[in-house]
Image: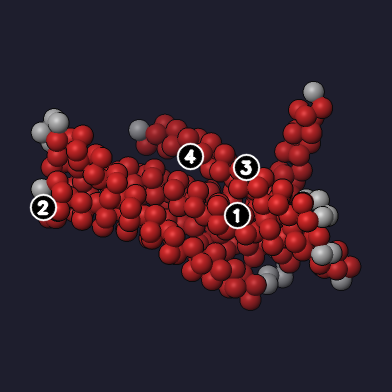
Amino acid sequence: MRLVRQGIFRFQNFLQFSWHAFIQSITGKQYISDTIHQLDRVGMGSLFIVVLTGLFTGMVFTLQTGVGLQRFGVSHSVGKIVSIGIIKELGPVLTALVFAGRVGAGIASQISSMVVTEQIDAIEAEGIDPVKRVVVSRLIACLIMLPLLTMIMDAVALIGGAIICTNYLGVSTTVYWSDTYGILEGSDLLMGIIKPIVFGVIVSLCGSFYGMTAERDARGVGHATTRAVVVSTILVILFDFVITKVMIVIFG
């Protein structure tokens, strides 16, 4: 029972923290230089692993899908399935999970280290809201960069699929790209954009919250980092289902 109360209390604190961060992100002074630095850090710093993950994800998914379709004699339709699967599901989710493991952990470790070394206390002593000074720039950076990284992963994954189709499945590049673009609708692209926006908010807020509430010792940094990654991963998977269900209800 005590664990349940602690969980409810922590969830309430997270909601209050999230609301405060959103308010601070749209009001008052904005630290533009910090935001630009974070954009470079979370964006360019994650580019290589996103490209690598996208390339091999597209190749593996296309290979598995194509081999399965060959049993039914419809391997020429592989582009349609790969396109929908990557744009609507694999691209946003895998990018978010990679992002959570790298950026979310980095945010939590950075902020928790600032808590341990009393830098957050120093910011408060100067009369500055630490959420405004530390959290908002990271929230905005994740909100911008995760959708962009998702688009890059989608493009690279589709290119990887084209390589497999041409070299292993005997499907011409023309047919593959024609099916890829022909099957997509506006609702598919919309889902592929909404998901990474929500996931970016989740990753940044989880990393920031667990960093700001870390215990003031060396062990607290490790705990904050682990909790941020685990919770953000769970929430990404949970909201992936919720968004998918809502979009299907709306668009069919």
Mark 3 vs mark 1: which is more N-terminal?
Answer: 1
Element on which disc 1 rests: helix
Q: Which residue is mark 1?
A: 104
Q: Quadrant of the C terminus?
A: top left
Observer able to see residue 75: yes
Element on which disc 2 rests: loop
Real-space Cα distance between discs 4 and 1? 17 Å
Q: Which residue shows up at 33% across the image and 56% down it?
A: 55
Q: Which residue shows up at 57% across the image and 39% down it?
A: 234
* Residue 175 located left or right of residue 156: left
Element on which disc 4 rests: helix
Q: Which residue is mark 3?
A: 231
Q: Position of residue 222 (x, y in %)?
A: 70, 52
Three-letter amino acid code at disc 4? Asp
Outermost residue on the right side: it is 125
Mark 3 vs mark 4: which is more N-terminal?
Answer: 3
Real-space Cα distance between discs 3 and 1? 10 Å
Dots 3, 4 in contact, CB < 8 A: no
198, 93: nearer the viewer: 93
- Relative vertical location of residue 227 with respect to residue 2 in this rendering, above or below: below
* Residue 27 located left or right of residue 88: right
235, 53: nearer the viewer: 53
Outermost residue on the front side: it is 219
In the picture, the disc for residue 172 is: 2
Real-space Cα distance between discs 4 and 2? 33 Å
Q: Which residue is mark 4?
A: 240
Dots 2, 1 in contact, CB < 8 A: no
